[in-house]
Image (cartoon, grey):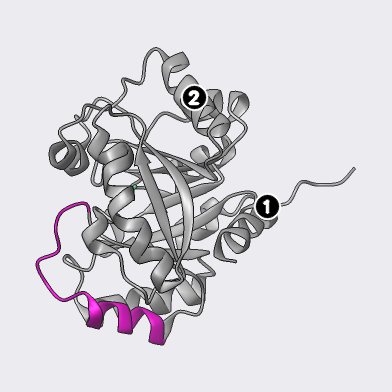
Amino acid sequence: MTARKLLDAAERRGCAHLVLVDPDRTTAPRAAELARECEAAGADGILFGSSTPLENDPAPVMRALRENYRGPIVLFPGSAEQVRADVDAVLFLSLLSGRDPRYLIEEQVAAAPRLLAAGVEAIPTAYLLVGSDEGGSVALVTGTRPLPIEPASDVVAHAQAAACLGFTLAYLEAGSGASAPLPASLVRRVADAAPIALVVGGGIRTPDQAAALAAAGARFLVTGTVHEEGLAVRPFTEAIHLPAPVLS
Ligand code: 1GP
């Protein structure tokens, strides 16, 4: 099972690295290059998807990833429309930071029959837009506002609700291309108080930022924009994989 594989990787590494590939913003040759980098660096998975409706056929990009990367490829869909069978699993998202029934349950009702018919594994994921950047394209598409960073207790309570509702993951999202990642102090507060594996993404631009978020308790970190801009995968993977504790 892909969820198990990912959680095991996070357990083994301390924190796991997921690389986001947006098929509308990545050519097939670039996807092949990125996939080879992910394979060589030991990145733990590739997220495939876009928060906006797809404009191009994503199949060539998926093929390029499959041909060059042996790890899990997980769909990170912007809507039920993007559900496809050639992935190892789907982040089955519910936008818990918003209050719009469409993104809390209606898209899920539309997607579930197709997922089950295709035999694709769903990874129940509470999606929480957080931050001061207005949430980027997800906020725009969904018409929801992100949870403010302060008070942290509100973000904590949302992640705790996700845990109580039985979600496998809680994804703290600053928004793709956000001007800054979420503060490590916030991630630490949530990780300490909510018994659920945290995915953190949006605005991670340097390996140091990634290392700080991993040390703060994120179980998965997602990087996307930096690789679209040409930065290599390996320094991020190395920063994210926490060093094993020294036994005394
Ligand atoms: C977006 O969290 C991911 O959903 C990645 O964000 O593109 O800013 O790395 P970036």
Measured Cα–Cα span from mark 1 to mark 2? 21 Å
Quarter of the image that includes the N terminus: bottom right
Which label sits on residue 185? 2
Spot occupied by residue 58 in the image (x, y as percentages of width and height): 21, 74
Residue at the bottom extreme? 67
Check disc 2: other Cα within 10 Å, few if <14, some if 14-19, many if 20+: some
Spot occupied by residue 243 in the image (x, y as percentages of width and height): 67, 51
Which label sits on residue 11? 1
Q: Earlier in the sequence, mark 1 or mark 2?
A: 1
Spot occupied by residue 200 in the image (x, y as percentages of width and height): 43, 42
Which label sits on residue 176? none
Residue at the left extreme? 55
Q: Residue at x 39, y 76 (%)?
A: 35
What span is in magenta? 51-67
Under mark 1, the amino acid is Glu
Element class at badge 2: helix
Q: Is residue 106 visible?
A: yes
